[in-house]
Image (cartoon, helix red, strand yellow):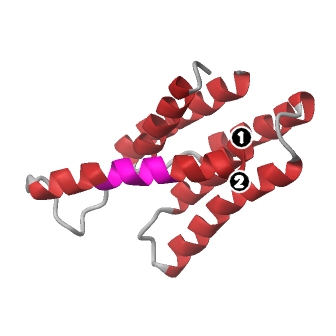
Amino acid sequence: MIQSYILLGTLGVHSFEDVKRREITVTLTLFSGIVGILLHLLLHRQSIYEMLAGALLGVFLLAFSYVSGGKIGMGDGAVFMLTGLYLGWKENLLLMFLSFSMAGVFGLALLLAKRIRADDRLPFVPFLFLAYSLMVMGQGGA
């Protein structure tokens, strides 16, 4: 339960940062990751392999960010590494699917309404926050 609150709080702060500055505070991500690892050691919610596999999804996004010249931000990859530590690979993959789907639908709606152009960039972490909030609510609370 505490892990869900910490992750929600971190994603909430990062959402605000992403909207306002189009970047996230790496120290907060790092601190939250350390706390997540420490909580894992205390609570044993998942195996270390599950945590590492979850974080690996974020590593793939970081690599894609590098290869694509920043089409996906490095911060987004770092945040998915963080969520992977807390959620493991299955739940992180679900989070990735939900957040990318929400961002895609929202972006398409803005594009069709001519509020943005095809090459405009949207802050992504708010969709991650919304998707994780829905996942937590779907589990009956944090």
Residue 29 position, x and y percent, is 65, 44
Q: Magenta stretch?
A: 97-104
Residue at position x 85%, y 35% in the image: 40
112 to 37, vertically: above or below: below
Please identify the quadrant where the C terminus is shown: top right
Give left or right: position of 40 versus 123.
Answer: right
Residue 70 position, x and y percent, is 45, 71
- Is residue 131 on the magenta stretch? no
- Is residue 100 on the magenta stretch? yes
- Tags 1 and 2 touching, CB below 8 Å: yes
Residue 31 position, x and y percent, is 72, 39
- Number of numbered discs present? 2
Callout 2 amino acid: Gly
Residue at position x 75%, y 58% in the image: 53
Give left or right: position of 98 versus 60.
Answer: left
Residue at position x 63%, y 24% in the image: 5
SS label for mark 2: helix
Residue 97 in sight here: yes
Res 54 label = 2
Please identify the quadrant where the N terminus is shown: top right
| Residue holding disc 1 | 86
51 to 58, vertically: above or below: above
Name the residue at the left extreme: 114
Q: Upstream in the sequence, badge 1 or badge 2?
A: 2
Would you call the spot at circle 2 few (<14 residues within 10 Å), some (14-19), or many (20 or more)? many
Would you call the spot at circle 1 few (<14 residues within 10 Å), some (14-19), or many (20 or more)? many
